[in-house]
Amino acid sequence: MISDITIGQFMPGRSFVHKIDPRMKIILMTAIIVFIFLAKNLFSMGAMVGFVALAVLFSRIPLRMYFKGLKAIWFLVFFTAALNMLYIKGEHLVFQYKVLTIYEEALWQSGFIAVRLVLIVLISSMLTYTTSPTDLTAAIERLLAPLKLFRLPVHELAMMMTIALRFIPTLLEETEKIMNAQKARGADMESGGVIKRAKALIPILIPLFISSFRRAFELATAMDCRCYTGGKGRTRLNVLKYRFRDFFAFLLVGGLCAGILYLNTLAPSLVR
Amino acid sequence: MGIIETHDLRFVYGKGTPFEKVALDDVSISIEQGEFIGVIGHTGSGKSTLVQLLNGLLRPASGEVLLGGNDIWAKPKKIRNVRFEVGLVFQYPEYQLFEETVYKDIAFGPTNKGIKDKEELDRIIRTAAEFAGLKESLLEKSPFDLSGGEKRRAAIAGVIAMQPKVLILDEPTAGLDPKGRDRILDRIRAYREKTGSTVLLVSHSMEDIARVADRVLVMNHGKVEMFDQTKNIFKHGERLAEIGLRVPQVTQVFLELKRLGADVRTDVYTMEFAKGVAMDFLKRTEAAPGIPAEKPAVSPAGTLREEARPDDTDATEGGDAQ
Amino acid sequence: MEEKLTPPSASSGEDGIQQISLQDVYFEYESTDEAPPKEVLHGVSLSVRKGEFVALLGHNGSGKSTIAKHMNAILLPSGGKVYVAGMDTADENLLTDIRRTVGMVFQNPDNQLVATIVEEDVAFGPENLGIPSAEMRQLVDDALKAVGMYEYRRHAPHKLSGGQKQRVAIAGIIAMRPKCIVFDEPTAMLDPRGRQEVMDAIDNLVKKLGITVVLITHYMDEAAKADRVIIINDGRLLMEGKPNEVFSHIDMLREHHLDVPQATELAQYLRSEGYDIPDDVLTPEECARAILGARAGSKKE
């Protein structure tokens, strides 16, 4: 059933990666992604690959889940790498066939691009696999809090995210129900051209919109009854607190970043 | 041969995933043309899965569904035609209304069926609206301006308009007040009597089922628990309670009497019959105290409605349905 | 159970033992393009005492839900006054106080749950009230235990059954420590099992936590559990009294499209036939005992 799709693919667990404070996790993962791009020779990239591999293992998420994430972007990786391989010109020609030329520089470049993309996907999947959507929302709200000074409605955005996360499964279920009901009235959604198929969506979309508005209205009343008046003066049940392990993780990633910068100086850059 | 039959029907949700769950297993039933069948079972008993298998919205993992003797999945590409033969009204069907007017919404089914002739379509729509108890004046209104009960009946009319041989209604009275509920049950009963169609009524409410069904199918854990004449089903009140179904309150009264050691029958499920049995039970004592009773003089439930006592000021059936 | 969810200490403005009081309330929906203004309440006066369990009965469109929505200032009367613990609901400055005194549970459990995790949802109200985190944990845990959903505190609401969702919604209100909870047809969308769960939870509120309950319903067997039943028809009070008093007017109820518990109807019938059956039969058990009693009585003669 489509309602079984979980958003963000959170997989509960008790690993070290799971337990890192979500704010710290977001900061550290962002840092790692930046440094993935800064790793420019085999030493530094090797260190990065090693670190991500260890993190993946320590997250205790089944490896097939990561492969699932990679499968989705396999084509993109291949395509970007191939394009780079063909278009980048350099000094050391490796292969030539008529207009098709491949240079050594291009090989390195496309190889690095492929590795970078894979690492980024691994790291961001790790974030969503090991952090519940609720924690993510709370962390984003907290991290963006300084932007309130610039009149950015941070709390409202976070509330919207929470409600969206809460209602996506409900609305998916509802879509399925409406679809079945219209199919039971002989609606034909499997045949015909683009226009016919688009038209066939009307009997599904209209009831869905109407019911969403009704839900929104009822939810607003219910929130009123629970004294919701916006972000001002609100407290939280689960307060995020930095613990020792968060600083430990910070030091680890800090060490990695320093190491990358140092390793970059040991050999010439292979990519721009 | 029944109008609709199933043989060893089995259905599995989420096949091949870790969430795999057998929703229906080993279901073989046969329903005759023109029967009024009540289907009961608690949530998750497989009754909703069963009705979706009967009109081809779900495809069985194994076993078959026969409609008029033919396997509905013989030609999978033609499965849509089965849905016109077996009309299914979902729970809370008012949420499927989408057209600008009630008239157009009722026309959706028959138009999909391929009825193009304007006059014929018009006749079908008006007949369906009448069966559902919708006033002519409502047909040109937006379905979203109707009251809750009217919306529900408009949605039911939309399925009746496909002129199905078998009409299945999943919880058609859910969430309605007694007035709305009585009205819908009466309309369904009248529809069945006039068209001679086969009707399946899925409900949590034993009271509703007791009022209308000839036979009752009791589902439990994806299997057929009982499938028998209504009066026979309610003999098994204890068993029904055991599998989490609420028997009608009158039945509960007699089950409780029996539990307290009284010698009474327990296949009582309508008020009129209950009154007779209770009177009989009380009179019996006066006549022959202490002697275990012979069977009461009141006839069993099948013919009850006709026997409603004339001196009853508050006839339960249909009195408030205008 | 050890929940100590005593209501917050009585505010100084509390009006004796009356918690909610509607005084000659009129209400009309504003006119729209198509419809003229429509008056749905025509002078309703009623009051709910502290610790009482009141059921409001009536068919759809009778105005019972409109009355409920006046009890915590979702709607304001167009004529007359509504007081909650002595506070005038028309006073906007008192809105938060009114809503934390009288909580509300609605029909559709899906549309009242805000968060993606059960305990976070229950905490939503206390969070809005600015209760410190340390206290909140206790409030949330107690509320979840009171409705028997503590084991599900880390679950996602959309995976729960209807009855469970509704119990979470109730916990979300209990966690705000209201003195009174108004239930607007809380079981209408539930299956029999869900209905039973919710009714058990409501029973618990009344008996164990001493919370005042107003239950709006059209199920007679639910209303039979109340201390007092009020029948609403066409925006007016039609009848009021103990369940057995009200249910003895079978014809009158029928006339207004309301059911009578079958046990009551059967007992009334036997009584009218001259058998010695008490007039306060509400449940099947009581009915069975009454019949046996009548039989024993006639044996002696």
Image (spheres, helix red, strand yellow):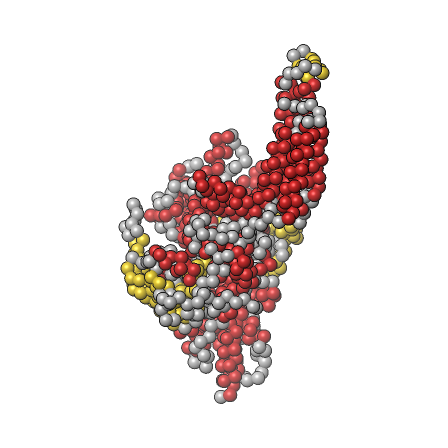
Residue A143 or residue C225, whichever sits in front: A143
User: Which residue is farthest top?
Assistant: A98
Can you say whether B148 is above or below C236 in the image?
above
Residue C283 in the image: state x and y as whole percent: 49, 72
In the foreground, C117 or A228? A228
Position of residue C156 measured from the top left corner of the image (x, y, whole percent): 57, 51
Instruction: Write the residue at 55% across / 55% down.
Output: C119
In screen coordinates, is B246 left or right of C11? right
Instruction: Report the residue that reaches farthest toward the bottom.
Output: C301
Looking at the rendering, in which quadrant would you find the C terminus of chain B? bottom left
Could you tell whether A86 is left or right of A221 in the image?
right
Quarter-wise, where is residue A114 in the image?
top right
Picture mark count: 0
Q: Along the line of sight, which residue is nearer the eye, C226 or B85?
A: C226
Q: Residue at x 71, y 39 (%)?
A: A54
Q: Is residue C11 above or below residue B99?
A: below
Residue drawn at x 54%, y 72% is B254
- Give how far across and how far down residue C179 sits, in percent: 44, 65
User: Quick check: can you spot residue B269?
Assistant: no
Looking at the image, can residue A247 be seen? yes
Compared with residue C99, is residue B61 higher up or lower down, i.e. above or below?
above
Image coords of residue A159 (percent x, y) = 48, 46
- Asked where in the image residue B71 lies, by quadrant, the reply is top right
Vertically, is B229 above or below C300? Answer: above
At 43% across and 80% down in the image, what residue appears? C274
